[in-house]
Amino acid sequence: MAMPPLAGPFPLTPTGINLNQVPRTPAAFCLGTIGVDGRFVAGYVGRVNDGLAAHLRSYIGSKQYDVFMYALAPSPQRAFVMECQIYHGFSPRDNTMHPVRPPDTDWTCPACGKF
């Protein structure tokens, strides 16, 4: 399964977030680090329905993550689908479980069919 195109990686700093202002729209994101080989190493995958920049700011100063990547979505359902695709594509070390669908939805993961 193909992952959605992700913007980044960008520094997980106030300046890095401000320079990459995104509209208040649903999005999927990935936090991580840059490995010694220069490649992105995924640590955590998540999604927001509104306010990606504010959500990313809550991770600034984390000892675990220093960069972020993201993909904007036209709807919360598409953000969930993208979160699942990124989760299965990267297998991030800090996600202890599969992405959870919102309550009162019947959405399923396009990669594994969960739910």
Image (spheres, grey):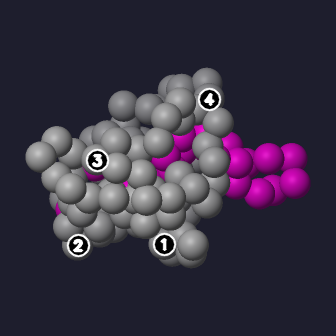
Which range is magenta?
25-48
From the viewer's perspective, tell me whether residue 101 is left or right of residue 88: left
The answer to whether mark 4 and mark 2 are in CB contact below 8 A is: no
Residue 82: image quadrant is: bottom left
Residue for point 61% across, 43% down: 92
User: Closer to the camera: disc 3 or disc 4?
Assistant: 3
Q: Earlier in the sequence, mark 1 or mark 4?
A: 1
* Residue 84 sits inside the magenta stretch: no
Question: Is 68 located above or below residue 74 in the figure?
Answer: above
Rendering coords of residue 30 (x, y %): 51, 50
Residue for point 50% across, 58% down: 112
Q: Earlier in the sequence, mark 1 or mark 2?
A: 1
User: Closer to the camera: disc 1 or disc 4?
Assistant: 1
How far is the residue under mark 1 from the one under mark 4? Answer: 24 Å
Callout 4 crowding tier (Cα within 10 Å): few <14, some 14–19, many ≥20: some
- Viewer-side residue, 19 vs 81: 81
Q: Which residue is mark 2?
A: 74
Per the rendering, the mark at residue 4 is 1
Residue for point 47% across, 42% down: 98
Q: Which residue is mark 3?
A: 101
From the viewer's perspective, tell me whether residue 27 is left or right of residue 23: right
- Viewer-side residue, 75 vs 100: 100
Amino acid on which disc 2 is placed: Pro
Q: Which residue is mark 4?
A: 64
Rendering coords of residue 107 (x, y %): 26, 58
Per the rendering, the mark at residue 115 is none
Q: Earlier in the sequence, mark 3 or mark 4?
A: 4
* Residue 42 sits inside the magenta stretch: yes
Let me know if residue 64 appears in the view: yes
How far is the residue under mark 1 from the one under mark 3? Answer: 18 Å
Helix, strand or loop for disc 4: loop
Rendering coords of residue 27 (x, y %): 32, 59
